[in-house]
Image (cartoon, rainbow, N blue to C red):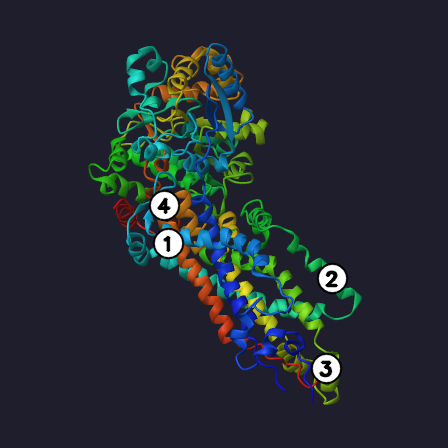
């Protein structure tokens, strides 16, 4: 007797396997959809201030809240969230009763959709009504936080311009000075490469490092307005000739061996581009101002003895101002418009964000706050030379270009970063780059 | 001759009553006097499965017809996401890459798993010791494995600097090239999953009756003949099971790609789950991400059904008759 087939277990398993695949794919997105609206997090007489979890900066923020709470009936509470999940948590909570009253953000694209949806308090009237409040901050940094011409953020942390870092030991060995113009920069690259050393470290495994190059090249070649038009959807947008020239310059740099050959595998984290500079395997590095702190931590002797820094080289004949700066202007505090305690929240920002205690606290952890007239406070510190340079760089900048990926919509930023990576890999030319970004901008 | 197949041994009181129409009879659970658990017993598992599999699945399909940034109310946009998806070169490339990695993963993992599994099923003591070492990667999380390889593959300070030149990457630039990055994903997949599949084959190979081999040896069969004519046919069902797990697993591989290549260089290793993540949690286009997720669900289900159907798995015939 032959055994008959047993269809039911098969059916079950078949369905099960199908659903197994289905469930796994769906859970990721379903989780986001299933969040509920119940319960506010702050008590009746308390408002929440959301910040990134950071063991250096959190005590400074807490101290400012303590000072505020001492003189206020409405109390403020600090809520910390790790960097990895901050944006997701904010995105999910911003339109629910669990929203923060005051929250940390990166300005620009990180809050634009909230501002346009009316979820954020327009701080413009508060700043206009109180010139002392407005003038307490560096104007270029305050303005960089505008959305559609209105203020939604108050600077609350350090300024992060992007600048060139140099290993002076390598440059001295091969006999070239620290370059300040584009001609000098190219000559230095050729000499360094001729000695078998990578001229410029580039963490090409992550495209935000490559973004710094096109940001500065576009700014130097075409001026600050080129990208402002792109972000606002006005003017020639991506079709501006400066974009094409910047992309072509990048292709030339790659072909010239300025970044070495294996940069697409180089990471930014430990053992990455910064280590190449520290160990003398590269001579230069374009990076945000935070890089100094990393060097201090990873290779203190290098940071104090061999590290030099300077502005991105000036390009002869370019329309841009050589003093113009690109980077992350700062981090901001924004206030949600539905907060029941927004008057108290704004009062907290007015009282504390430019207070001497708060500024001293930030400088103490290595920040360069975007607060006006703090040169004397910076000069007192151990790293006065570097902090003063960064501060002056921003103070004297005619414009502060917000990082492109923060300035435009996320979907467009995604395409921009991907197409830029393809340019560095040699898979895409200038026309292809412009086309891809125009398509994404719709 | 009496049959002693596994299916015949299973007690099936409902079926014996209704031999003429076995399917219907089998489904009439709890309707007779037989001591069967009622539907109530299924409830907790059904609720759990419904809550964490069915409900999210339905929600994802619904979301795919909306535009939703993650806050506010989703706006119904009809077929917009689907129209965009069909013309999106990124989706086409990601589907191609996903299928390529799935095929490569299956083609590399299956033979090695069978070889190790069959070898490890032998009774020798050294095999037991060695196989317990082979199975170590099973204990590591995908994230840990990806981060470990991430370090190894640094072109300046990792193993890639020394090993790269030996395998055609003179400057250690493995992750920075398309075929290098794909190769790494296939290799890490092998390293991570072969132990698990070897375990399946080891267990399956151990239950192949020794007398089959004894009989073959009397007939003068070589070891090679015995492997192809006894071991492989006897492992048929395990091959199907293992393949389904491998293929469905490959289709939804996400964390290895995220942590090891982040879809790069450029977009060379963007697979569908990574594209879904990027659309949802980088671009905050939950509606479009849901459409990609739905494609993934359909693809995964279809592929596993196709494997089940065309491999003869559905028939579940015994291959031990006569013993």
The image's mark for residue B291 is 1
Q: Residue at x 36, y 35 (%)?
A: A406
Q: Chain of mark 1?
A: B
Q: Residue at x 40, y 33 (%)?
A: A94
Closer to viewer: mark 2 or mark 3: 3
Callout 3 crowding tier (Cα within 10 Å): few <14, some 14–19, many ≥20: some
How far, Cα to Cα, is label 4 from label 2?
A: 49 Å
Q: Secondary structure at mark 3?
A: helix
Q: Position of residue A262 (x, y in %)?
A: 48, 48
* Residue nearest the viewer, comparing A368 with A315: A368
Residue A175 in the image: above or below residue B267: above
Residue A428 in the image: above or below residue B298: above
Callout 4 crowding tier (Cα within 10 Å): few <14, some 14–19, many ≥20: many
Q: Position of residue B56 (x, y in %)?
A: 45, 51
- Where residue A227 sits, quadrant-wise, is top left
Q: Secondary structure at mark 2?
A: helix
Q: Chain of mark 2?
A: B
Q: Position of residue A438 (x, y in %)?
A: 26, 46
In this picture, residue A243 sits left or right of residue A1: left
* Residue nearest the viewer, comparing A349 with A276: A349
Residue identifier under label 3: B213
The image's mark for residue B130 is 2
Q: Residue at x 54, y 37 (%)?
A: A275
């Amino acid at each position: 007797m032959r055994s008959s087939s047993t269809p039911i277990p098969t059916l079950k398993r078949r369905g099960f396997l199908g659903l197994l695949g289905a469930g796994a794919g769906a859970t990721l997105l379903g989780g986001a959809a299933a969040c509920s609206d119940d319960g506010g997090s702050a008590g009746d007489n308390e408002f929440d201030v959301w910040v990134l979890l950071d063991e250096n900066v959190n005590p400074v923020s807490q101290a400012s809240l303590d000072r505020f709470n001492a003189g206020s009936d409405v109390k403020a509470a600090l809520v910390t969230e790790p960097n990895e999940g901050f944006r997701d948590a904010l995105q999910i909570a911003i339109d629910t009763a669990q929203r923060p009253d005051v929250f940390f953000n990166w300005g620009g694209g990180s809050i634009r959709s909230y501002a346009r949806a009316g979820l954020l308090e327009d701080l413009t009237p508060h700043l206009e009504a109180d010139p002392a409040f407005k003038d307490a901050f560096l104007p270029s940094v305050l303005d960089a936080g505008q959305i559609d011409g209105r203020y939604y953020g108050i600077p609350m942390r350090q300024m992060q311009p992007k600048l060139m870092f140099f290993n002076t030991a390598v440059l001295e060995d091969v006999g070239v000075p620290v370059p300040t113009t584009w001609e000098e920069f190219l000559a230095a690259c050729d000499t360094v490469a001729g000695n078998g050393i990578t001229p410029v470290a580039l963490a090409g495994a992550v495209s935000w490092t490559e973004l710094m190059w096109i940001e500065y090249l576009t700014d130097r070649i075409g001026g600050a307005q080129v990208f402002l038009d792109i972000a606002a959807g006005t003017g020639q947008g991506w079709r501006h000739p400066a974009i094409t020239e910047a992309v072509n310059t990048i292709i030339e740099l790659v072909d010239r061996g300025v970044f070495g050959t294996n940069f697409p595998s180089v990471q930014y984290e430990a053992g990455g581009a910064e280590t190449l500079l520290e160990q003398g395997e590269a001579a230069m590095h374009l990076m945000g101002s935070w890089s100094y702190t990393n060097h201090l931590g990873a290779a203190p002797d290098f940071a104090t003895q061999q590290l030099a820094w300077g502005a991105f080289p000036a390009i002869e004949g370019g329309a841009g101002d050589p003093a113009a700066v690109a980077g992350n202007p700062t981090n901001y505090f924004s206030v949600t418009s539905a907060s029941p305690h927004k008057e108290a929240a704004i009062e907290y920002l007015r009282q504390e964000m430019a207070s001497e205690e708060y500024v001293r606290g930030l400088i103490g952890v290595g920040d360069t706050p975007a607060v006006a007239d703090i040169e004397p406070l910076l000069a007192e510190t151990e790293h006065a030379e570097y902090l003063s340079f960064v501060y002056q760089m921003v103070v004297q900048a005619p414009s502060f270009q917000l990082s492109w990926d923060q300035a435009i919509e996320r979907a467009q930023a995604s395409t921009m970063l991907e197409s830029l990576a393809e340019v560095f890999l040699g898979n895409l030319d200038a026309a292809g780059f412009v086309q891809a970004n125009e398509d994404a901008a719709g | 001759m009496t049959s002693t197949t596994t299916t015949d041994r299973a007690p099936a009181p409902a079926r014996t009553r209704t031999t003429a129409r076995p399917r219907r009879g089998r489904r009439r659970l709890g309707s007779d006097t037989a001591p069967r658990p009622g539907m109530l017993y299924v409830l907790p598992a059904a609720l759990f499965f419904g809550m964490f599999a069915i409900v999210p699945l339905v929600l994802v399909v619904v979301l795919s017809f909306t535009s939703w940034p993650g806050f506010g109310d989703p706006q119904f946009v009809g077929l917009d996401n689907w129209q965009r998806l069909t013309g999106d070169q990124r989706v086409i490339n990601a589907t191609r890459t996903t299928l390529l990695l799935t095929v490569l993963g299956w083609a590399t993992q299956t033979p090695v798993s069978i070889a190790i599994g069959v070898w490890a099923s032998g009774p020798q003591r050294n095999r037991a010791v060695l196989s317990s070492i082979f199975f170590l990667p099973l204990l590591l999380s995908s994230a840990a494995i990806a981060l470990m390889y991430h370090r190894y593959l640094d072109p300046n300070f990792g193993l890639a600097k020394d090993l790269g030149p030996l395998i055609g990457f003179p400057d250690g630039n493995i992750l920075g090239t398309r075929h290098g990055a794909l190769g790494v994903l296939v290799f890490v997949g092998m390293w991570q999953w072969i132990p698990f599949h070897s375990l399946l084959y080891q267990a399956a190979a151990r239950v192949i009756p020794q007398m089959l081999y004894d009989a073959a040896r009397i007939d003068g069969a070589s070891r090679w003949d015995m492997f192809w004519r006894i071991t492989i046919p006897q492992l048929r069902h395990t091959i199907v099971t293992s393949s389904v797990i491998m293929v469905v697993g490959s289709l939804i591989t996400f964390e290895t790609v995220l942590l090891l290549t982040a879809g790069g260089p450029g977009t060379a290793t963007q697979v569908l789950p990574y594209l879904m993540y990027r659309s949802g949690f980088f671009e905050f286009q939950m509606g479009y991400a849901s459409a990609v997720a739905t494609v993934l669900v359909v693809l995964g289900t279809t592929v596993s059904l196709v494997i089940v159907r065309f491999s003869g798995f559905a028939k579940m015939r015994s291959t031990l008759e006569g013993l």
